[in-house]
Amino acid sequence: MIPLKILFTMPIPDDLKAKQQEQFLDHTYEYIENLASYQAIDTVDCIVSYGSDITEPIIEDAKALRWLMIFSAGMEELPHTKLQEKSILVTNVRGIHAIPMAEFTMAYMLSHVKRLANFAMKQTKNSWERDPKIDELAEKTIIIAGTGAIGTQIAQFAKAFQMKTIGVNTSGKTVSPFDKTVSIEEIQTILPEGDFIVSILPETSATKSLYKKAHFEAMKNSAVFINIGRGSAVSEETLLDVATNQTIEHLYLDVSPIEPLPKNHALWKFPNVTITPHVSAHSPKYLYRSFDIWLENVARFQKEEPLLNTINLNRGY
C-alpha cells in the first residue's frame, strides 16, 4: 500500500483526528481552512472538503490528486468536467443527512397542523385565544420527491404518524416503506392527492425549475409544499406567483433559488411562506457520521475495493 497525503479543508475534532491516526498510521494528514492559499497542493493525494472550495484551478494544480472526498451530498458546485478530465475519484457522505432532515420535515408538518407559529404570535399579544384550525397528521397524504436515504427516513417517520406515503423517483420503482411510488414523469398526476409535498431532489439539469406553476395548480388549495432539497427546483418567478396568488396554503422553504436570500427579497414578507436558512441537515453529529463513511472508504481504498457513495459525474449524483 502506498501511503496517502490527505488534506482536510475544515476543522476536525481532536477525537476524530486521533481515531483516524490510530486506524491508519501510514498516511499523512494535514488540516487547513483556506485551500486557495495552500502552497503544497501539487503533493496531495486526497482532499477532504465540503465542496465549495474545490475549483478548476485547484484541481488543475493538484497534480497528484487521486481522490476527492466531499463531506456533503450536493455535487453541483464541483468542476465536473475538470474532475472527469483528470479521472479523479469522487465520493460523498450521502445518507448521513437522513435523520436531521427527516426530523426537520416532521417539525415543519407538526408545526403546521398544530398551528404553533400562530400561537407564538398570539403569545406576543398576551392572547389566550384558541385556534379552531388545529389538525392532525394522521390519515394525511405525504408525497415525497426523492426516495433515497432521506426520503425513506421521512416516510418512516410519517408512517409512525399514520400518514399515507407516496414516493417519487426516476424510475417509479417500488421502494419500502412507501405505500405507492411513481416516476418523476408522473408526478403531476398524483399531486392532487397530496396534503404535504416534500421535495428533496438533488440539483441536476433534469431537476432545475422542475416544479412549474401547473404543478402547484394541480395541488389542493390546502396543500403544503416543503423544499429541503435544492432551491433551484422551483424558480423565483414560480414561488412568487404561488405565494401571491395563494395557490396552495403554505410554502416551507429551507432552500431558495438565491442563497443567502437577500434581506429585501419579496419572499420574506408573505405570511404563507416560512423560510429557514438551509439548515435542515445541521446536527452536532454531522462530522461523526461523515467520518463513519470516510474511515470505511479509507479501508476500502487500501484494499482496492469499491468505495461507498462513488459519484457518477455524468449524472451529477
Image (tube, grey):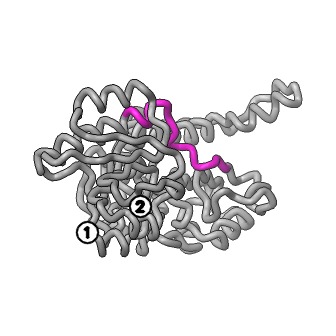
Mark 2 neighbour class, 10 Å CA radius: few under 14, some 14 to 19, many 20 or more: many
Tell me the residue at 39%/24% (across/down): 15
Residue holding disc 1? 87
Q: Which residues are magenta?
A: 275-288
Q: Quadrant location of residue 163?
A: top left
Question: Residue 100 location, x and y as percent?
Answer: 46, 37
Residue holding disc 2? 75
Residue 72 falls left or right of residue 134:
left
Q: Quadrant location of residue 201?
A: bottom left
Q: Callout 2, which amino acid?
A: Met
Tell me the residue at 63%/48% (across/down): 277
Question: Residue 49 location, x and y as percent?
Answer: 43, 50
Q: Is residue 26 magenta?
A: no
* Secondary structure at numbered mark 2: loop
In this orientation, which residue lies closer to the viewer: 4 or 275? 4
Q: Height in image: 206 above or below 1?
A: below
The reply to whether dot 2 and dot 1 touch (C-beta < 8 Å) is no
Tell me the residue at 31%/27% (across/down): 19
Residue 156 falls left or right of residue 228:
left
In this orientation, which residue lies closer to the viewer: 58 or 286? 58
Q: Is residue 281 magenta?
A: yes
Q: Callout 1, which amino acid?
A: Ser
Residue 77 in view, yes or no: yes
Mark 1 neighbour class, 10 Å CA radius: few under 14, some 14 to 19, many 20 or more: few
Question: Residue 214 location, x and y as percent?
Answer: 55, 74
